[in-house]
Amino acid sequence: MKARILASCSPGEVRIAVVEETGAGHAGLLDYDLHRPGAPDGVGDLYQGHIEAVVPALAGAFVRIGDLSGFLPDRDGANGPGDGEGARIAVRITRAAQGGKGPRLSGRLEPPERALVARHGDAPGLVARGPGALQRLAMRYPEAPILADAAGMAAALPAALRERVRLVPRAFDDDVEDRAEQLARPEVDLPGGMRASIQPTAALVAIDMDLAAGTAERRPKQTVQFAANRAAIAPLLHQLRLRNLSGAILIDLAGLAARKRSALAPEITAALQRDPLQPRLLGFTALGFAELLRPRVHPPLHELLQSPHGAGLAALRRVAGQVHHRPGRAINLRGGIPLIEALHADPVALPAFEQATAVTISLQMDPALPATAWMLADG
């Protein structure tokens, strides 16, 4: 397999797609992620923090790290000698803030990390950033070239990875753009005429599979449905990886009697082994749902895209495409209050927009607009 890492850069955001290279062109997405330099998810970040509250009922403590408070379980180092309220403690973020919950922390650091903290001193705050999305994918695919459409992209990578970066006029072609857009939709077309509806909730991810297309086969109905489900399993589970859906996941297979569904367990287990996070099949519920558990680490794609910040960055990307190379123009972006606040809170996005377009942009809050809505007017 030959892979290429494509980095499509827009103000405040880099969309990263890993595609398989074949003689017939792109065979599909192997991986997908977003890098937002003005609002990184924090996973891997090293902090000198202080304990705000010890909570025995939760078997852990809340630790203040910068502007956030994260949870440090006892098993990950919250109950060491002197770890009372107010104590200084070095921690690493192991799970990003997501789903309305703060980040998860660990005090179990490697010797090089402890050395970094020691050089930082006792002052609380960020000691070192963890690897960003582009760096993580570059390490996962060590032989893949990195094709970026912004000259400064290499500066975001460690020196050892910069030689792999090649500048291209456009990182995403129409095919990759379309595949990236499909990841924002809840419906997924799968092989064998199957379709899946993916519905994330606060408690779990519910997936309903359906035999969307009719079939002219004359084999018994259960035989046809079993074959269709089996063909769709690997592509469906790959969608979980691309969308970074995690936590408890329930899959309602299409049409099969509950007693037949467990026969697909080997297919599900084999497909899950290809996922770097190593999700597990826990079994089948009494109703016949396949019950999966995928570790939570980074925020799911739908949270990133549907947030006011995600909507604001999508607006800047669209506007930048419209006004590029029209220097001297001034524009006014009106948006819902949360969207405008999110863009103001991003220290990278607006300066990057003006640098890339030579266009001055001003932001205006409009209480009449929904949280993620926006409109554009000439300044």
Image: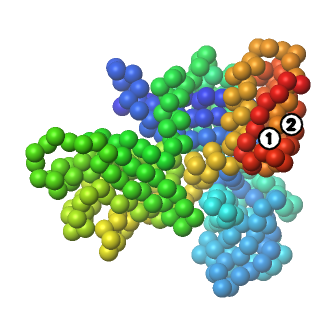
Q: Residue at x 74, y 18 (%)?
A: 324
Identify the element where label 2 is drawn. strand
Q: Position of residue 363 (x, y in %)?
A: 86, 36
Please indicate whether residue 119 sits to the left or right of residue 209 in the image.
right
Give residue 292's position: percent from left, percent from top: 40, 63
The crowd level at tag 1 (other Cα within 10 Å; few <14, some 14-19, many 20+) is: many
On the rendered image, what quadrant is the C terminus found in?
A: top right
Q: Nearer the viewer, mark 2 or mark 1?
A: 1
**Residue 149 visible (yes or no):** yes
What is the basis of the colouring in this image? rainbow
Q: Nearer the viewer, residue 286 or 18?
A: 286
Determine whether the residue tagged by mark 1 lies in a helix, strand or loop. Answer: strand
Above or below, 138 relative to 117:
above
Which residue is the site of mark 2? 363
The residue carrying pointer 2 sits among few (fewer than 14), some (14 to 19) or many (20 or more) residues within 10 Å by Cα, namely some
What amino acid does circle 1 point to?
A: Gly
Along the viewing direction, whichever of 46 and 39 lies nearer the viewer: 39
Q: Quadrant of residue 105?
A: bottom right
Write the residue at 61% across / 71% down: 76
Q: Does label 2 or label 1 sit earlier along the sequence?
A: 1
Name the residue rendered at 86%, 18% in the picture.
329
- Asked whether the beta carbons under mark 2 and mark 1 sit within 8 Å of each other, the answer is yes
Assign the N terminus to one quadrant of the image: top left
What is the distance, in whole Å, between disc 2 and disc 1 at their CAs?
Answer: 8 Å
The image's mark for residue 335 is 1
Dividing the picture into quadrants, the one containing residue 148 is top right
- Image coords of residue 13 (percent x, y): 68, 36
